Amino acid sequence: MNPESKLAELGLTLPNPPAAAGSYVTTVRTGNLLYCSGTVCMVAGQMTHVGQVGKEQTVQTGYKAAEICALNTLANIKAAVGSLDRVARIVFVSGFVNAVDGFADSPAVINGASDLLVKIFGEAGKHARAAVAVNGLPKGSTAEVQVVVELKP
């Protein structure tokens, strides 16, 4: 099953690709690698999850925020290469969690992005990863995700 059919099976749709919010581009391709800029949990121009995990947000709502970040990244990938079928594998995910000082469960939050990528791409969705707690993210976002993908020739 192709990735876009898998999204539909999961009851998910890709949002419109989010535009860059500064002096950068959303994706850069070099060879067969596509580097995706960080995406936050925004849908239709509105933040879905704002605030720190451990204060305004929980691990569970943070998980959902990370999933929305991954959907935004997938929208940017599709916009860059035309189809998610072009993805050979997800190589690396950097996940950032807006969290209170001392927060130690950032991996559980970023699993929202990682679990979704595995559901969509299967074995090719398994990736190396970093999950880091920080004291703030753009627009107060609860999560931000950056992804590197390998493209099919």
Image (cartoon, helix red, strand yellow):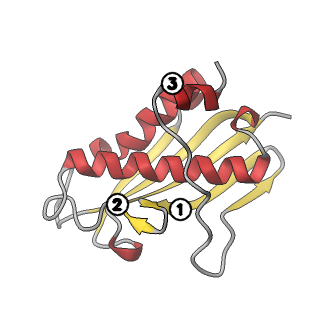
Residue linked to disc 2:
48
The CA distance from mark 3 to mark 2 is 23 Å
Of helix, strand and loop, which one carries label 3? helix
Q: Amino acid at mark 2?
A: Thr
Q: Earlier in the sequence, mark 3 or mark 1?
A: 3
Circle 2: is it few (<14), some (14-19), or many (20+) Cα within 10 Å? some
Residue in the picture at 78% in, 45% down: 82
* Residue 21 showing in the rendered view: yes
**Mark 1 and 2 residues: CB-CB less than 8 Å, in contact?**
no
Give the quarter of the figure containing the N terminus.
top right
The residue labelled by disc 1 is 38
Q: Look at the numbered disc 1 and give the secondary structure of its residue.
A: strand
User: In the picture shown, does residue 134 fall above or below 80?
Assistant: below
Residue at horizontal 53%, vertical 62%? 38
Q: Position of residue 54 (x, y in %)?
A: 14, 59
For label 3, the residue is 9
Label 3 CA crowd tier, 10 Å (few <14, some 14–19, many 20+): few
Mark toward the start of the polypeptide (1 vs 2): 1
The percent position of residue 105, horizontal first and vertical second, equals 22, 48
Task: Judge depth for marks 3 and 1 and give the one in front.
Answer: 3
Q: Quadrant of the C terminus?
A: top right
